[in-house]
Image (cartoon, rainbow, N blue to C red):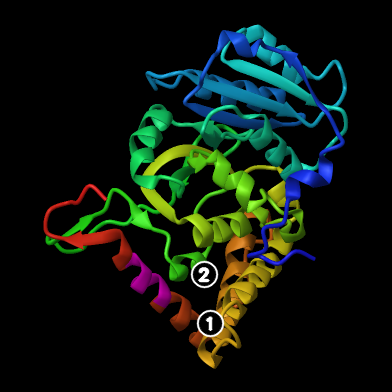
Amino acid sequence: MSALFDRHDCFAEKASVPSRLAWGDPLQCPDPHVTVIMPVYRRPDYFAKALASVLQQDYPETYEVVVVDNNQETDSPNQAVVAQMADPRVFYYRNAENLGMYQNWNRGIELARAPFVTFCHDDDLLLPGALRILMQLAPVAGRACILSAFHTIDEKDRITGTTLQHKPHLGFLQPRKLVRYTRLGQYLGNVSCGDGCLYHRQSLLDAGGYDSAFYPAADYALHVAYAHFYGAWINPEPTACYRVADNESSQVYEAFPDAMKKIHLEMAGRRGEPSRLLTRFIEALHANNRNMTRRAWGGDNKSGQSMSPCDKFLVGAARRLNAFNYYSFGRRPSV
């Protein structure tokens, strides 16, 4: 079992399984500045929308799109979507076997050629201007990652919510353009699944990639480890749309709270025996996350479980304290 802060080479686990380039010529897109990784499986209708949102970006420099298909069948409908759009920036790879979700994400990192990467999963969307916004912030980030806010959408592309939209309650508090992903913020949860975020590719490789041992919260685990080794920023401006629909997350939502608690315990134990207050806080977060995941993906069973007054107080106080991280006094700073 992997530990959160071990640099375990997750890329090696499926290194023997080839990914064959079935469409595209890298010579037609030399020296990309950023790679958009698109892990796909069997959702061609959603994928067509996702790919269109990526190709319609207004980023003025060269970027590539690496599509990695976990459907090993030669007649995969995803290849037909790529061929129909016929864009030289797109490279379609088909895995020789299904690698699993997180290993497919890792394969996209390996196949990317640009120094920076972002993700757009096959049922999600990049918002207009996403790449331009991220690459403008890249010089500040360096090897750190930029985790962006996002809209949630339903099956019909209707926006149902927006994350990280903190607004000042007093005139002298101004929202920051970039916010540190602090340890408290990490305890409070994952900021993004990777859509519309920006990562330094070499940092992802050095960190070891997505670790399936933390399924189904391996993206959360990677963000915490990445922040520890290289730092992480939060961009409160939405850059993507995350679809809350019938996908893998909706099928395993009940496992998320336990996976997140595992991450919290490893965070707490890194500096020795955690305090009684921190241990109690982790239990409160576990109760809160059970309610949140059920409300998001529970279908007809969204009532959740009641939280104790102490749990509600601890989580609420932590959220209020963390919210101050999003603001500064006086004029709005660049960072």
Residue 185, picture quadrant: bottom left
**What kind of residue is marked 2?**
Tyr
Q: Residue at image x 41%, y 27%?
A: 128
Judged left or right of residue 111, residue 65 is left
For mark 2, does the 10 Å Cα neighbourhood hold few (<14), some (14 to 19), or many (20 or more) residues? many
Q: Is residue 50 magenta?
A: no
Residue 164, picture quadrant: bottom left
For mark 1, does the 10 Å Cα neighbourhood hold few (<14), some (14 to 19), or many (20 or more) residues? many
Residue 157, position in %: x, y?
Answer: 53, 32
Q: Residue at image x 39%, y 78%?
A: 317
Above-or-below relation of 69 to 180: above
Whether residue 87 can be seen here: no
**What kind of residue is marked 1?**
Phe
Which residues fall within the magenta stretch? 318-323
Judged left or right of residue 42, residue 125 is left
Residue 270, position in %: x, y?
Answer: 59, 77
Q: Residue at image x 47%, y 25%?
A: 33
Q: Secondary structure at mark 2?
A: helix
Quarter of the image containing the N terminus?
A: bottom right
Q: Residue at image x 64%, y 73%?
A: 266
Using the image as rendered, state which of residue 246 and residue 214 is in the foreground: 214
Using the image as rendered, state which of residue 71 and residue 92 is in the foreground: 92
Disc number placed over residue 187 in the picture, else none? 2
Q: Secondary structure at mark 1?
A: helix
Magenta span main SS? helix
Residue linked to disc 1: 281
Asked whether the residues under the numbered discs 1 and 2 touch, taking CB atoms below 8 Å apart as contact, a structural biologist would say yes
